[in-house]
Image: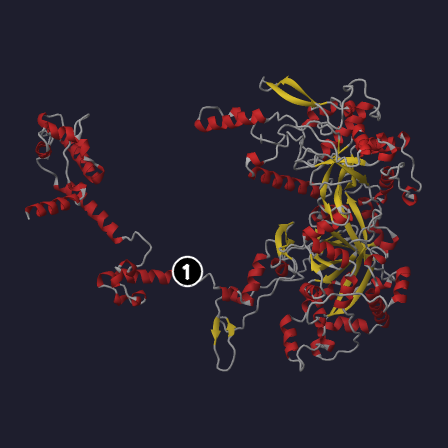
């Protein structure tokens, strides 16, 4: 029994806190004792002694008993020296103090007791009080009935319940999904989200089916979430593809015709094609397109491409002009228009579409219940709540800011009507059939049926005029003839047709159908339409009148009212006839000609653009969907221009500000993607001979070619090598040999191995083109030191020179070669003097296998390359030898210096010289980009992919004008236009044929 008691007592002593023990301060006295108190009279030392004791006692458990033994003596040794356990116990008892101070001891113990109570009262977990009980004591009622808990836990449970009530009140701001999905709350939320980025009227429809991107201040659909690349191509080729182009900006100019033409003529040139003064466009019968430049700065300082529509003449001097621009070009063009027309003062503020919010957003609502009636939401004052008004148009606009500017000197007014006019594009051979099946011309109405048709007052007033009624009937007859056409490309390019149609929601089919043309119905009349075209008067439309557009937008019948009328039909699903209550919508139809340049696939991608008043976006969109069209996004628009082989805005306009900005953003994104890959999985572009894999150095390219021309004093054929730098005899260009040259690096003093490619193309290499000033620029897109050649006369001349004039590949092209001159120095030298730094838009088709990629290099083949191709028809192309990575050692040193810097072993100045070094990328200033590789670089590819239309790889890009003429002048007659393509991450060259389509 005594043994069991001793074990219990020892166990209890082990569970006691260690801070209860009061150790004595070790002192220098004999026997291991300590000085209990200072000598009497020494008050200062006594206070220090008490403070030291008090601090040691407060430390509590942090003190260990090992600190009471002398240095170098462990607990076991001291115990053995004193005779085992007994000796140790006696030594501890001898070290006990003779007396303690009560106040300090009580304070120390009070602090420990408070800490213990605090630890006991606080929960260490997130569980509730009833969850801390043992499982056999828990009851289900404890969660809501506190009295079921033990009394000792009820107070704590009450506090938890009160805390939960406060938390519920705070979380009540976040509404449940059912409340958030109510229509009034959805509209308020959508209005809030439209304050930052502009939403199209079809945004919700696109957001459910497309990958959305934020570009140019808009939220746009980029590509469908389903696989649809080939399906969209088939739709453009055989049926119809629908796109929402409402993000395009409309700038409206009003004023005297002479004053408008005088100033607008300074921003364009007749050399590039059409101008604002073109007679067919000035009448309002056709749409025009051109490139705008800064005033009197052609061919430099390009602003971008635009399309324009003149309002048909009404007998007065004042005219109205719409200029449609891409949102990336809007600010630059608008700024230039303000300057040339001296429009500095804004017009009077006119809020066309005020955005109102409901009262319930500002004041809490009270739901009043009345027997037998529905609940009505009322505010505290008892007034009915005004419903939230949906944003229509541009939600980012300030309603108190004017978006119209007028000139006090010329009287010209400029208005920004972006998002005021919606624009849809139908692409494909059956796009006119979709239009005729979806839209029906409005019926003529001369009298008001009742007071509910006041929204159609403008239509009734116009129908009282016999001339306007006959004009509407003529427009309706021409619109019906579109059903018998086989393709929109059969109409004259840019044809404009005005029309007033009824509500398209009335004619919705019961299920999706595929619109098909009826060729036999209007066969004779369609042939007459081909020959004569649309009359000038039929281009008139009421959409030009802002008051009518505002009336049509505000008096639109809501979907709820329309569905209510359908529910009241006697025969469900029958046609709904609204009679005079039906809305009348003015629209404008503009024909898109499709592919006009080149000889293959003429008219591919043709279609119609439809212009609508705002507010009617979804009312027209859904009926188009029901006619079996496929919807495309930004990527489909890019594909459409790629198959048309036309430049895409702003990607393919490197000489304008928007194009340069796009190139910078693309470079940044590609570089970040490159850095995200592990170093072992990245392509080493330095070894591959690719100087700039993420951006095209247009400025450097044009400068290098200009320097080569100046150094040579003319063009030298490769068969006559330059005497200053002759190559080794018997050099094989199909398998170029590289000489390893050991050079001492000027930076490190170490011997580095570099590769020098020997080639006869180095005959035009000069020292002045690689000067420090030229090498200081990373790429030419930073400054506009080059232009893009857009003169139609010169492009036709270059196009004729690109075709072979001998051999079995010779083409008889009498139309394009009519009036063109032969390629002699007297002809092309004046061109080079006028445009020393110019780029030319070209199309490339691969002869055999290969898939061109972005930023691929367009190179000039050597004589041996062409000879090998003529002997072996299966010859794919030469290969580029691997280059030496001259930055590899520098990157290693940079990593070592960074490691030393982290350890503090190196200075910061040593790593500043090589901060931007990335393994695999050229980190210094670019050398001569034309002669860096074994084949002379001519240009770069901006877009390239496998073409479903041609069945081979096709690419679009720019080449240097000087380099192009040099290549064509030195190539054999049967090999004209043959070039080499090499992707940035490959060493393989591929043969391709270069064309200039005009």
The vertical placement of 13 against 83, above or below, is below
Observer-nearest residue: 858 or 68? 858
Q: How is the image coloured?
A: secondary structure
Does the rendering let one see residue 713? Answer: yes
Q: Is residue 226 left or right of residue 173?
A: right
Residue 953 found in image quarter: top right
Q: Residues within 10 Å of mark 1 (few under 14, many from 20)?
A: few
Q: Which quarter of the image is occupied by the C terminus?
A: top right
Q: Position of residue 452 (x, y in %)?
A: 69, 77
Q: Position of residue 330 (x, y in %)?
A: 71, 49
Q: Is residue 178 left or right of residue 697?
A: left
Q: Is residue 707 left or right of residue 572?
A: right
The vertical placement of 122 against 49, above or below, is below
Observer-nearest residue: 479 or 134? 134
Q: Secondary structure at mark 1?
A: helix
- Residue at the extreme left of the image, as rendered: 2
Q: Position of residue 145 (x, y in %)?
A: 29, 68
Q: Position of residue 586 (x, y in %)?
A: 76, 66
Residue that label 1 marks: 170
Total marks shown come to 1
Does the rendering let one see residue 396? Answer: no
Observer-nearest residue: 908 or 348? 908
Q: Residue at x 19, y 32 (%)?
A: 66
The vertical placement of 762 against 839, above or below, is above
The vertical placement of 878 against 528, above or below, is above
Q: Is residue 238 left or right of residue 63?
A: right
Residue 433 found in image quarter: bottom right
């Amino acid at each position: 029994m005594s043994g069991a008691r001793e074990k219990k007592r020892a166990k209890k002593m082990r569970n006691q806190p260690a801070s209860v023990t009061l150790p004595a301060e070790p002192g220098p006295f004999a026997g291991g004792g300590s000085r209990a108190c200072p000598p009497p009279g020494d008050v200062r030392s006594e206070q220090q002694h008490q403070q030291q004791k008090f601090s040691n006692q407060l430390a509590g458990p942090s003190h260990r008993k090992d600190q009471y033994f002398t240095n170098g003596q462990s607990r076991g040794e001291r115990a053995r020296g004193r005779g085992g356990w007994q000796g140790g116990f006696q030594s501890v008892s001898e070290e006990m103090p003779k007396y303690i101070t009560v106040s300090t001891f009580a304070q120390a113990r009070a602090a420990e007791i408070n800490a213990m109570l605090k630890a006991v009262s606080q929960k260490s977990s997130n569980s509730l009080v009833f969850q801390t009980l043992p499982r056999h004591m828990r009851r289900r009622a404890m969660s809501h009935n506190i009295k079921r808990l033990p009394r000792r836990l009820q107070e704590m449970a009450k506090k938890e319940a009160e805390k939960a009530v406060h938390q519920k009140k705070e979380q009540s701001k976040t509404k449940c999904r059912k409340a958030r999905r109510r229509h009034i709350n959805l509209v308020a939320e959508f209005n809030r989200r439209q304050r930052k980025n502009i939403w199209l009227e079809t945004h919700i429809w696109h957001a459910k089916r497309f990958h959305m991107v934020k570009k140019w201040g808009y939220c746009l659909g980029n590509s469908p979430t389903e696989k649809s690349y080939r399906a969209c191509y088939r739709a453009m080729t055989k049926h119809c593809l629908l796109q929402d182009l409402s993000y395009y900006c409309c700038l409206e100019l009003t004023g005297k015709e002479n004053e408008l033409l005088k100033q607008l003529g300074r921003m364009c040139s007749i050399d590039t094609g059409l101008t604002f003064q073109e007679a067919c466009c000035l009448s309002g019968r056709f749409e025009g397109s051109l490139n705008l430049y800064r005033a009197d700065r052609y061919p430099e300082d390009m602003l971008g491409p635009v399309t324009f529509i003149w309002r048909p003449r009404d007998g007065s001097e004042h005219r109205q002009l719409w200029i449609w621009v891409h949102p990336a070009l809007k600010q630059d063009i608008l700024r230039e228009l303000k300057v040339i027309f001296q429009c500095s003062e804004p017009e009077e503020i006119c809020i066309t579409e005020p955005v109102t919010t409901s009262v319930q957003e500002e004041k809490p609502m009270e739901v009043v219940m009345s027997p037998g009636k529905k609940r009505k939401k009322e505010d505290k004052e008892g007034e009915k709540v005004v419903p939230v008004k949906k944003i229509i148009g541009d939600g980012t606009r300030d309603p108190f800011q004017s978006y119209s500017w007028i000139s006090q000197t010329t009287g010209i007014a400029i208005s920004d009507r972006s998002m005021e006019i919606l624009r849809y594009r139908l692409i494909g051979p059956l796009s006119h059939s979709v239009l005729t099946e979806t839209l029906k011309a409005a019926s003529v109405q001369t009298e008001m049926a009742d007071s509910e048709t006041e929204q159609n007052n403008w239509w009734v007033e116009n129908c009282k005029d016999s001339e306007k009624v006959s004009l509407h009937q003529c427009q309706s007859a021409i619109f019906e003839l579109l059903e018998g056409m086989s393709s929109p490309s059969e109409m004259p390019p840019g044809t404009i047709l005005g029309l007033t149609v009824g509500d398209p929601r009335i004619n919705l089919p019961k299920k999706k159908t595929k619109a098909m043309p009826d060729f036999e119905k209007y066969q004779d009349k369609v042939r007459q339409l081909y020959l004569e075209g649309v009359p000038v008067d039929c281009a008139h439309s009421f959409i030009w009148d802002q008051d009518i557009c505002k009336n049509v937008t505000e008096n639109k019948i809501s979907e709820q009212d329309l569905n209510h009328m359908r529910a009241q039909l006697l025969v469900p699903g029958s046609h709904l006839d609204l009679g005079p209550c039906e809305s009348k919508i003015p629209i404008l139809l503009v024909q898109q000609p499709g592919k006009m340049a080149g000889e293959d696939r003429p008219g591919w991608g043709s279609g119609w653009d439809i212009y609508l008043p705002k507010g009617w976006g979804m009312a027209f969109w859904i009926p188009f969907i029901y006619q079996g069209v496929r919807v495309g996004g930004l990527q489909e628009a890019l594909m459409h221009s790629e198959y048309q082989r036309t430049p895409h805005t702003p990607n393919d306009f490197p000489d304008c500000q928007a194009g340069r900005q796009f190139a910078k953003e693309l470079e940044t994104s590609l570089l970040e993607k490159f850095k995200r890959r592990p170093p072992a999985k990245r392509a080493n572009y330095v070894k591959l001979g690719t100087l700039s894999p993420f951006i095209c150095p247009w400025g450097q390219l044009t400068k290098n070619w200009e320097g080569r021309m100046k150094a040579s004093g003319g063009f030298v054929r490769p068969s006559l090598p330059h005497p200053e730098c002759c190559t080794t005899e018997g050099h094989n260009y199909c398998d170029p040999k590289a000489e390893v040259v050991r050079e001492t690096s000027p930076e490190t003093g170490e011997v580095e191995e570099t590769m020098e490619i020997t080639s006869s193309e180095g005959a035009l290499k000069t020292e002045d083109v690689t000067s420090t000033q030229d090498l200081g620029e990373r790429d030419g897109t930073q400054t506009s030191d080059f232009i893009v050649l857009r003169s139609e006369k010169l492009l036709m001349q270059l196009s004729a020179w690109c075709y072979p004039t001998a051999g079995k590949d010779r083409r008889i092209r009498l139309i394009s070669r009519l009036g063109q001159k032969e390629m002699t120095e007297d002809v092309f030298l004046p061109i080079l003097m006028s445009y020393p730094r110019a780029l030319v838009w070209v199309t490339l088709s691969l002869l055999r296998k290969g898939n061109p990629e972005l930023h691929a290099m367009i190179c000039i083949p050597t004589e041996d390359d062409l000879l090998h191709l003529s002997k072996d028809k299966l010859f794919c192309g030469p290969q580029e030898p691997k280059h030496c990575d001259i930055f590899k050692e520098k990157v290693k040193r940079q990593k070592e210096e960074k490691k030393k810097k982290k350890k503090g072993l190196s200075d910061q100045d040593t790593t500043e010289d090589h901060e931007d070094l990335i393994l695999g990328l050229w980190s210094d200033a670019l050398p001569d980009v034309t002669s860096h590789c074994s084949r002379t670089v001519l240009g770069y590819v901006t877009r390239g992919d496998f073409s479903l239309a041609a069945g081979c790889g096709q690419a679009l890009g720019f080449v240097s004008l000087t380099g192009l003429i040099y290549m064509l002048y030195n190539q054999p007659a049967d090999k004209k236009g043959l070039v080499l393509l090499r992707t940035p991450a490959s060493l393989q060259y591929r043969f391709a044929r270069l064309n200039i389509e005009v």
